[in-house]
Every structure is written in structure tokens, then in C-alpha cells.
Image: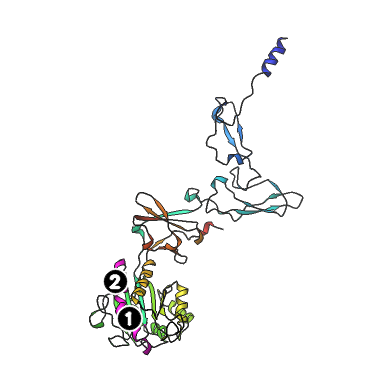
Amino acid sequence: MLLAGLALAACSQAPTQFATGDGGLPADVPVFDDLPTDAARRQDVMVVRRDAPSEADVELRESCETPFDDNGDGRANENCACLPGSEQMCFQRPGELFREPCRMGRQRCEGMGELGRWGDCTGAWLPLPEAEQQCALTEGFNNATAVRPPVDIVWFVDNSGSMIEENRYVSMNLNTFASAMEASGLDYRVIMVARRGTGTLQVCVPPPLGGPACGDSPRFRHVDQQVESTDGLQLVLSTRPRWIDFVRLQSLKFFVAVTDDESAMSADTFERLIRAEPAFERFTFHSIVGYNDRTDCPSLARVGATYLTLSDRTGGERARVCAMDWSMIFRSFADAIVRRTNFWQLTRTARPETLQVWSVTNDGRRTLLPMSAWAYDVMANRVTVNPAMLPRDNAGLEITYRPIDASP
């Protein structure tokens, strides 16, 4: 009777309660408040109790219901059964680390029988240890770290008989161009290839850009050369010995064509020859040429298709040679050059589609800049920002991107 009573008492003790809330738990069972928010997805989390409360821990098992690495071993869905030959998305890190711009990989079910096992996960963009497990790098720059190289601009102007007004417009407006460059704070130089003088088919650049009597200045060199309707590109190349010493090796290079005719030299030939010159591997070509018919431009000789091709290939500006307001053209060309000279160098080559550029104020507020405010130069691995698109209180930039060497 006594033995039966002891047995009955032992069986009647209440079992340990593993509640889902924060009440009803024994004092020696920890509450895991810091489990990831997707813990409900992890169906195989087990609380393992031992005699000493300090030894309690969490043992994670791989779930075959998710594409992630649930047990933290660097693999996804290992030992999970599957149909041989099938494929699925995978990510060999825990689910809470999957965030933009990370991407899923793919894994294939391997085996020959009725059931197989999932193979390695390949092609995923994983979190970066050097970025504190974020999926993108963030580089911070203050305005003082913007690289602003010198700028050299080579103009050539068609002096043929149909260009009387256009020669006059260039003489009148080149100082408008120079004043915009001056206001930007850039170190710039201008080279003019055209007949020098004050005649109807000549170009004279007065001070402050030019010197007295249509002369040169520290920022300006005039190469006195007759330029006919179709030979502008050839003459830029053939007069090179007369202006190359005025060009800086480390400068950004720009060309500007002013003509109402087509070029006798092809765009391919000009590119091949100019890029063979030291420090001219990269350049931008702007065009003030004809690109409409004579209905809109009665004096037009021919459409400047070659020049427009060079502008398109190098990301240059274009303007109509028959336009009435050339001051606007010269200001817009200057602004386009300034936009290309305010850039930040990245430490690693970026996947272009992952780039984001943020303006940062002194108090840490961040504003995402629209893509129209900046450009990424893949070859030079640098981001150029249009200063006019920056907020007034901008103090620096943050550029986030996924490195291409971490993106299979």
C-alpha cells in the first residue's frame, strides 16, 4: 500500500511547462527573446535542458522547407531529399541575412534513384564579412575627397564660306563658355583650331579668355589654321604638334566641333588615331552641327553624322548649328564638362546595377540621389555627380554597391 502511494505521488507531479509566452516557465528555463524574427519558420529549433541552467543552448537543425542555411554550417538544404534533376533557389546563409542587393543561388538535386540529395548552392550573392554582413559595401566621402582633375578642351571651327554667322557666334560666346568654367573652380585650358582674325570667316577670342589683339593667354591657345567644310577632324590631328604641349597628361580631354557639313574622315578612323596618342585613350566629343534637314536649317550643307556618332559614343553633348541662341549652347556645354569633373573614386569595381548614391548632411541625414544626378564610369571605376543636383546642405556622399568580384 505504501509503495503504491509513493508511485501515485510520483506520477501526479506536474510536467515541466514549455510555454510560448513569457509566463508559466520554470525559473531554470531561459526565455529566448533574441531569436530571429523568422524563428517560426525554423520548425526544428529544440530547447535542450541540462542539469546546469548555464549550459542551456539552442540546437538548430536544417529545415527542408526553406531555401536558407538554417543550421549555420554554410550549406543549404544538405541531406534533404529531392527529385533527381530538379532545381531550386538557395542561399547558404541564414534567412535573416538575406537583404538587398543579395541574390539567391541555384542548386540541383543529385542522384540516380527515386530520391536524391540537393547539391551545392552556386551563384548566390552572399553577405560581405568586410561590410559587417551587409550585402553591399558603403563608401563614405566628404566633399574634400572629390577628385577634380584639370580639363583641356580642343575646339575646331569650320571657316568655309557658309559659316559667316557661326564664326561670329563663336567669337561672341566663347567667353560665356569660359566664365562658366571659371565659376566652377576648374583648372581648364582651351585650344582653338580655326583661322585667327576679325574678318567675316575668322575667329577672334577677346580677353579675358583670349589675349590682346586676338592673342593667346595662360588658359587659351589659338592655332591659326584655315578649316574647310570637311577636314576638321584631319586638321585636329595634323596640327597636334602645335598644341600638344599645352595639354596636361592627367587632364580630362574634350573636343568640340562647329560645322554645317559632314566630315571626310570617319568616326572609326578618328577614334583609332586619336586614341593612339598618349593620354587620349579617353575623351568626350561635343558637336554643334546639323542634324535636321534644310526645312529647319536652309543654310545647312549636310548633316554632321560623323560628329554625332562621336558624341553618342563618348556621351558628349550636341546642339544645332542653326540655333539662334548660342549663349545657351555654350553655357550648356560648359555645364556638361563641369558635371564630368566632380567624381569620387571607388576602391573596388562595382556592379553598375547595384549602385546607389546618397547625399549626407553634417547631422547625418541621408537623401538618395536620382540616377539623373550621377553617372558611373566603368572603365575608370568612379562615380561622377552633377554639383547642381546636390542639396544645399550636402556635406558628403555615401556610395553603396555590390563589388563585381563578389557577385558570381
Q: Nearer the viewer, residue 214 or 3?
A: 214
Image position of 29 with respect to 195: above or below: above
How packed mark 1 is, by other alpha carbons closer than 10 Å (few <14, some 14-19, many 20 or more), is some
- Check disc 1 and give the amino acid type: Tyr
In reply to whether residue 169 is colored magenta, the answer given is yes
Q: Pick the residue in front: 380 or 31.
A: 31
Depth order, front residue of 125/245: 125
Q: Position of residue 314 (x, y in %)?
A: 45, 73
Which residue is at the far left? 212
The quarter in which the C terminus is drawn is bottom right
Query: Helix, strand, or loop for circle 2?
Result: helix
Q: Residue at x 36, y 90 (%)?
A: 161
- Secondary structure mostly seen in magenta is helix
> Which residue is label 1 attached to?
169
Give amino acid for label 2: Ser
Residue 183 on image: x %, y % = 29, 67
Direction right: furthest residue: 114
* Cα distance between the residues tagged 2 and 1: 16 Å
In the picture provided, is 114 more to the left or to the right than 401? Answer: right
Percent coordinates x, y for residue 28 in the rendering: 55, 26
Q: Which mark is residue 322?
A: none
Magenta range: 157-184
Residue at point 67% right, 17% down?
10
Q: Residue furthest front?
A: 295
314 versus 200 height, above or below: above
Dot 2 corresponds to which residue? 179
Q: Is residue 176 above or below residue 19?
A: below
